[in-house]
Amino acid sequence: MLATGLIAASGLAWAANALNNDGKNAVTVKVDDKPVVSANSPLGPSYAPIVKRVAPSVVRVEVSERAKTVAVDNQLPPFLNNPGFREFFGEQPGQSGRGPGSGRRGQLLQQQPAQEGLGSGVIVSADGYILTNNHVVQGADTIKVALNDGRELTAKVVGTDPQSDLAVIKVDAKNLPAITFADSEKVEVGDRVLAVGNPFGIGQTVTSGMVSGLNRATMGLAYEDFIQTDAAINPGNSGGALVDGEGRLVGINTAILSRSGGSNGIGFAIPGNLARSVMEQLAANGKVVRGFVGVSVQDINPELAEQFKLTAREGALIAEVTPDGPAAKAGIKGGDVITSIGGKLVKDGRHLRLVVANVAPGKKVTAEVVREGRTLNIDINVTEWPGEKSLARTNGRGRGELGADTDDTGTLNGVGVADLDQQTRREFDLPKGMRGALVTSVEPESASAAAGLQPGDVILEINRKAVSGAEDAVKFTEKTESKKTLLRVWNQRGVRFVVVDETVTPAASS
């Protein structure tokens, strides 16, 4: 279809200029060669002046990766691990199996062909610094940058930040046309924007649209706060510019939501303020240093707001405090709600993470905390974020058969619980010193199942009372007058608060 359309368009352009046999124009058309004037155009202003200002600052990024041998994680068939079989294929007794075609035990090596990719980038300084997406340049052996004036330059990676999907590269050039940043905090839904980039490698392309939404989280990045736009963004636009009506950068085009792989009117850009903060650190140090206070948080839904007697849902509920972390040392507790930090209002858990990340390690900030109806001001000494590996929990442990369950007859209807014995702690890889009641079974149609409780969860608190074992879990729920029970629960993904509402009858499965 694409080839047919191009051919038809080309033929039409030729026919319009054709002459008849008398040497005269076959078709006479009206021509108005004056440029579009914003004030007089019934279709609104022309974007041409903006595009002329922005276009030189947006570049094409071409990356290539050499052919290489990579290990395939698929397990070898058992017969390939037989020493006699390996010897038949030329491996001498005592060899480790790391010759051609083999990797670590249980792996095969295969040749990965050379790869090429295209993306976009934005010139942010006259001396050659260019901002783009990490996924554009990740793994690249060579990077070429094509400027708007036709020059093609080799670029080197200055620094990358997978946590935000941003990267800074640099070319050896002077007096480049650097883009101007806007304050992306002032962007509003409904603002007109232009997306400039290099979709599908066809050349620089400009599309228009508006800001469709703010504060989107779609890619599962550690730090994301996307601007959503309906301006067409396609493969190859990654790393390109999203600009406002004055040609100022409000975002770095990054992703689309599409089933076809092409634009579907839902595109996402990293806000300019976040991009600028990351870019400045990468350019200066080659890495990003983020603030850390040591809390696990969750958003406040209506059920939690009711349980914690909150009048508003803004803020971040503290589900867990890292032992010996900055927040713990400052006196922050699980169940606290942080409503502002460092003078900035906190919208939700993700927003708190972004705000803290932008605080320089070593700085003291004041957190406004709601605790049991009282508002407290607590000073926290921010430290450097230790990285995901230091904070990661072991995931995906199997769940085997446990000892005898203690069936609950209180408000936690349909939940079986057990004490945390030595076998349980090994089986579920529980943190040392953890106290609570292990959930061993959950009836599928129960309110507890609807609340998200699963076998393998550990109940740490019931209605803000610490649970030391299965007996406590039963006793505390039997004494609950309300039909709504507040639990603090641990699993391999972290700690969270859960409200089990017995007044709501879960819909029966059909």
Image (cartoon, helix red, strand yellow):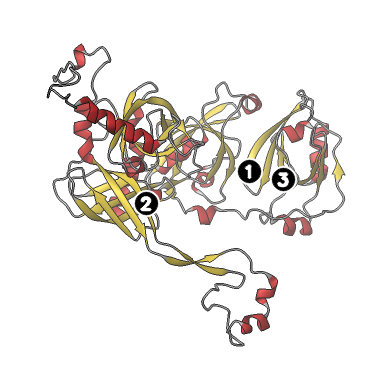
Q: Earlier in the sequence, mark 3 or mark 1?
A: 3
- Residue plotted at (86% across, 47% down): 405
**From the viewer's perspective, is the residue at label 1 or at label 2 nearer?**
2
Residue depicted at 72% across the width and 39% down the height: 453
The disc, 3 or 2, on the residue closer to the chain's N-terminal end is 2
Q: CA distance from mark 1 to mark 2?
A: 41 Å
- In the image, 430: left or right of 510? left
Q: Amino acid at mark 1?
A: Val
Side (left or right) of 61 relative to 232: left
The residue at which mark 1 appears reads as: 495
Q: Nearer the viewer, residue 111 or 489?
A: 111
Q: Amino acid at mark 3?
A: Asp
**Residue 342 coordinates in the image, percent (x, y):** 40, 35
Q: Nearer the viewer, residue 445 or 498?
A: 445
Query: Any mark on residue 117, and which?
Result: 2
What label does residue 457 carry, if any? 3
